[in-house]
Amino acid sequence: MFSKFTSILQQAVEALAPSLPLQEDFVYHWKAVTHYYIETSDDKAPVTDTNIPSHLEQMLDILVQEESERESGETGPCMEYLLHHKVLETLYTLGKADCPPGMKQQVLVFYTKLLGRIKQPLLPHINVHRPVQKLVRLCGEVLANPTENEEIQFLCIVCAKLKQDPYLVNFFLESKVKTCDSVGSTSHSGALAGGSKEEVVANDTGQAQPPGAGSTVVDGAVHVSPAIPSAAPTDTLGACAAPGPSSNNILQDYNLVNSLLNLTKSPDGRIAVKACEGLMLLVSLPELGAAKCLTQNTALCELLTDRLTSLYRALPQSIDPLDIETVEGINWGLDSYNVKEDASAFPGKRALISFLSWFDYCDQLIKEAHRMAATTMAQSVRERFLVAVLEPQLMQTSEIGILTATSLLHRIVRQVTSEALLEEIVYFLLGEQREPETLSCIQRFPLRHRLIEHCNHISDEISIMTLRLFEHLLQKPNEHILYNLILRNLEERNYTEYKPPCPEDKDIVENGQIPGAVDLEEDPIFTDISPDNALTKEWLSASPPITPDHQRTDGKTEVHKIVNSFLCLVPDEAKSSYQVEGTGYDTYLRDAHRQFRDYCAICLRWDWPGTAKPIEKCNLEAPFFEGHFLKVLFDRMGRILDQPYDVNLQVTSVLSKLSLFPHPHIHEFLLDPYVNLAPGCRSLFSVIVRVVGDLMVRIQRILDFTPKLLLVRKRLLGLEPDGPIVDHMTLLEGVIVLEEFCKELAAIAFVKYHSTSTP
């Protein structure tokens, strides 16, 4: 009570006393702080019962006022006094001792406000960055500390200052030289303020130093300035790296990162999120030395992967794939969930959100990080989580376990946005092989083999989920995905059989058209795609621009022949779309154009050729294998009449996505019905031809085939209510999917042709 009265009286006296010059006022307040420790006999009274907080606040106000009254960049006498008399060093010592109780909190607040409110750069001064560095070490030592809030505020302001001037991070890479004269030699980790041990600082970042190199003399002591001559660190490193009994090792500490890592474990979610934000700022700094130290000398990679692992293992053994796919609110900074307020809660939702939120943080951290740090962190996620934890779940034999693990992997693939992490996920799933596949070596990479086999699993749910995984994987901006799965096997075009043109070809194709086929301009089905049609004009005008490598070649099969080939594949007696309004071929054109434009944007930087590899340069003698992935897809496509509707939809969806890629070999293999296939080879068109042949035989054995087919189509479209089960339902649904798929392929071929031939 007496102390509070004294504080009030002191403030009243100061208000009534005549104003002193700023420097005298500043010195007065600082001496009032130091005199407390000389005069007081009760060091257990809390700091809030003293005048210290008031004096420190006054000192800050004076420094801000002084700066506002001077020209930009000019240091005033009060700031000179603070720097010259090592005020921050003294405050650090008082804060570390926490004397009186609560002093650490006051010191943290003072440092935070000083760095935040003073505009001129302070951290380059050795009497600022050295005590700041020391204070950083005190943060995060004890979880749930009463000063946690002040600690995180202080650390975040330091991170913000480093983001503004990235070169300053070199002051926080504490390089200590460890002498290797003997096995038991001690490291020189010195006290920075009058300690007995010597600290030898070495800048090993390899980065250019800021101007103003040299050293300054303050209070008779020599202090290294932020700009060390380039020869100095080189010589020091050379001496440290030299072999022999007297060689030294450079040991680096990044205590700013270490303190933030400790605070990410705080039970207070707000503190943990702020610590994550601080790490996000630090990983994005462009300094190579900082990036190396971050990944090599801190536990950042371990924190990311260990927490990812623990959160994954906290998930239930079985989660509905639909719940995994549709759960919302995944944002690492907003990981708040109240099960009582959630109408769509399901068992394990809290754990699922926590896992996906932390994965989102890992993804964003790697996305923002320096390239070297991003690569290292992504590799750590691959080795310590994907390989060590997720791979055994994907390789297990339990169908429930496989389905849950594949669903989570699918969600991860959908969610990932960082280039480095995506690359590691791709290598984890597919391997790094780029040579053509052979049937005998498809099991060389077990996980890839198992996942592709899961596309053909006895469980339809597992097949669908794995196919969806590959569908989303194909849409990711990574060239290795498509090359590993498809292109490496089509590189030599050895699926073709070279036949020189001969006069007999004229008997096969007359006037550039299949005998008996209807020309597009004369077919009423195609009246909506005439050049004068508004829809056609819209998507033709918006097609991706033609490039010099994408010129139309004379040997290219005319588009109307290709379109007709796909549209005429399904015989009229097996078609039903013409009897239902709004299901014509033209409905696929808009979607095909939009998707093709998106795929072209993805592939722009992959340097794909505009034309197929010349046939004379191809090794046609090499045995052709379509690859494990296409083999499974073609096998699935061949069973379209005997598979469930949902499986067929997913198989055709993946194949249509593949057909959209603007690579000439993919286009030829999947969309050109007139390619001369080598003996024993099959293409997408030839697979469909075999399916149609089987269909024609089976149609003959089904009574009232056409009415049943139309009824099933209307039920699928919701135009007819569900009624009695129709015989041969699986086959009828397969026929409908087949017809729609052929129309989709025709639309894709048409759009791709015009995008490359329209000037």
Image (tube, helix red, strand yellow):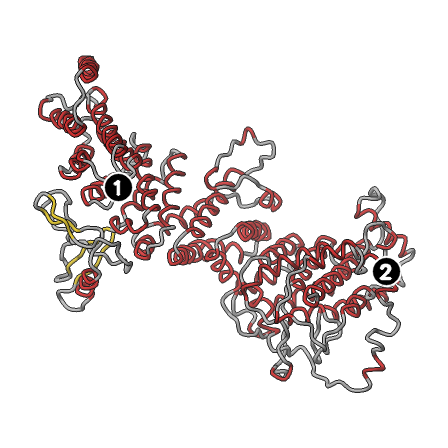
Instruction: Tell me the amino acid under the disc marked 1.
Output: Gly
In percent of the image, x 50 and y 57: which residue is there? 422
Residue 659, quarter of picture: bottom right
Of residues 121 and 642, the one drawn nearer to the viewer in this rendering: 121
In percent of the image, x 64 and y 61: which residue is there? 544
x, y percent for residue 259: 30, 42
Of residues 216 and 617, the one drawn nearer to the viewer in this rendering: 216
Pointer 1 or 2: first along the chain: 1
Residue 149 left/right relative to 706 = left
- Residue matched to label 1: 73
Q: Is residue 194 visible?
A: yes
Task: Kindly identify which numbered label has been placed on residue 574.
Answer: 2
Q: Residues within 10 Å of mark 2 (few under 14, many from 20)?
A: many
The N terminus - image quarter: top left
Relative height, residue 62 to residue 249 (above, below)? above
Element at label 2: helix
x, y percent for residue 281: 37, 46
Task: Kindly identify which numbered label has been placed on residue 423.
Answer: none
Q: Are marks 1 and 2 in contact (CB under 8 Å)?
A: no
In percent of the image, x 46 and y 39: which residue is there? 333
Most extreme residue toward the right, as rendered? Answer: 704
x, y percent for residue 574: 86, 60
Most extreme residue toward the front, as rendered? Answer: 71
Residue 89, quarter of picture: top left
Residue 433 left/right relative to 632 = left
Residue 378 left/right relative to 493 = left
Residue 199 left/right relative to 358 = left
x, y percent for residue 269: 41, 35
Q: Can residue 690 be seen in this view?
A: no
